[in-house]
Image (cartoon, grey):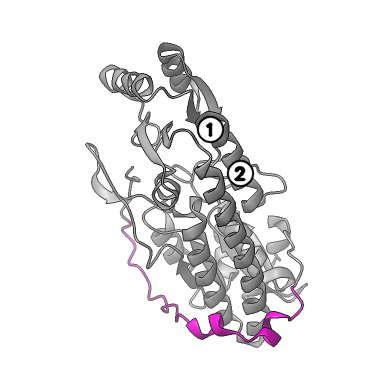
Amino acid sequence: MTIPFRRSTVTKPYVAPIVRITHWEQLDMTTRRLPRALAAGLTAGALLVAGCADTTNMSSNRMVVAASISPLADFAKKVGGDLVEVELLVPAGASPHTFQLTPQQMNTLSKASVLILNGVGLEFWADKAISAADNPNLKVVRTADGLDIIDDVDEEHGKGGNPHVWLSPVCAISQVKAIRDAFIEADPQHKYSYAANAAHFIGQLEQLDSEIRRQVESFSTNKFVAFHPAWVYLARDYGLVQAAVIEKSPGVEPSPSEASDVVRTVRKIEARAIFAEPQFSPKVAEVIAQESGARVLILDPLGKPDDYDYIKMMRANLKQMAEALR
């Protein structure tokens, strides 16, 4: 899938590069046993302190962090604990492919210390927003940098990268490390806390990785049909095959011939379910399911707005996959 890219007419400002502090991965056991700060998900309103020009929230002295999507916001909270206040820019129920920032969120960017992005074109608004924020102290981290990106090709936009890296825990671990390094650079006095928090959360992600591998081994088929190509990294890293997608580009419904091709694929692989997503209308998926004799199940790439937790979301998705593929 290729994400629409909007060119900005504003000159992109210089953004200091993130320095990868890889030696934090070599923490000794004494450091790893440091107390883990409790994760605190505060409301966006707490981030906006009128008249505060500093890059931290003066009422709490916590570092203000903006994150583009729910998974990255959760990663930031796990790494930052009670040292950070995290503003989620794209609500969990919205699609990052079409979202526009609000003036209130732009105000947050003007005060934030760190902006956490996925990259690979997901945040088409990022360059323009960074320029408009006019915040020379803002450290921008694109967490997909350095990952092996899967190409997407469609007729409308040509060749580009698939941005959905967070849906593989293998890639998520790399993203957490990038966030850890950005926090250490932005707030070095708390480097040991950030490093210890990251190490603890990475251990949880490694456990999730093992769970997924065990589940996939129990599947009777490894082929599935998805609403749009959000699950290609999960498929690549865990031995699954995305046999077909309904919408190759977000919001672009398939033509009659493309829909017929999907129906034929569903019948060929004897798929028991088609995976839709809560951020998009399921109508097309329901029509294809009816034509092919399959049913519609939901895989959620972004999670529910309330009480979001990446690991819980991925376990729920794994349960849905198992129901269709086991």
Q: Is residue 27 magenta?
A: yes
Pointer 1 local density, CA inside 10 Å: few below 14, some 14–19, many at least 20: few
Could one spot residue 21 in this view of the protein? Answer: no
Q: Compare marks 1 and 2 and give the one earlier in the sequence.
A: 2
Instruction: Please state which of residues 157 and 287 is positioned toward the viewer in this rendering.
Output: 287
Above or below — where is 102 with respect to 262?
A: below
Quarter of the figure with residue 79: bottom right
Q: Residue at x 60, y 58 (%)?
A: 73
Q: Residue at x 43, y 37 (%)?
A: 222
Q: Is residue 47 magenta?
A: no
Position of residue 130 in the picture relative to residue 109 (left or right): left
Q: Position of residue 45 (x, y in %)?
A: 71, 56
3D distance between C-alphas at marks 1 and 2: 23 Å
Q: In which quadrant is the N terminus drawn?
A: top left
Q: Position of residue 269 (x, y in %)?
A: 37, 25
Instruction: Please state which of residues 184 and 242 is positioned toward the viewer in this rendering.
Output: 242
Above or below — where is 172 with respect to 285?
A: below
Q: Residue at x 44, y 33 (%)?
A: 221
Instruction: Please state which of residues 213 and 147 is positioned toward the viewer in this rendering.
Output: 213
Count of all numbered marks drawn on residues in the image: 2
What residue does disc 2 label? Answer: 303
Position of residue 191 in the picture relative to residue 246 (left or right): right
Quarter of the figure with residue 50: bottom right
Between disc 1 and disc 2, the foreground one is 1
The amino acid at mark 2 is Gly
- Marks 1/2 in contact by CB < 8 Å: the verdict is no
Could one spot residue 206 in this view of the protein? Answer: yes
Magenta region: which residues?
8-36
The amino acid at mark 1 is Arg
Q: Residue at x 72, y 55 (%)?
A: 43
What residue does disc 1 label? Answer: 326
- Label 2 residue SS: loop
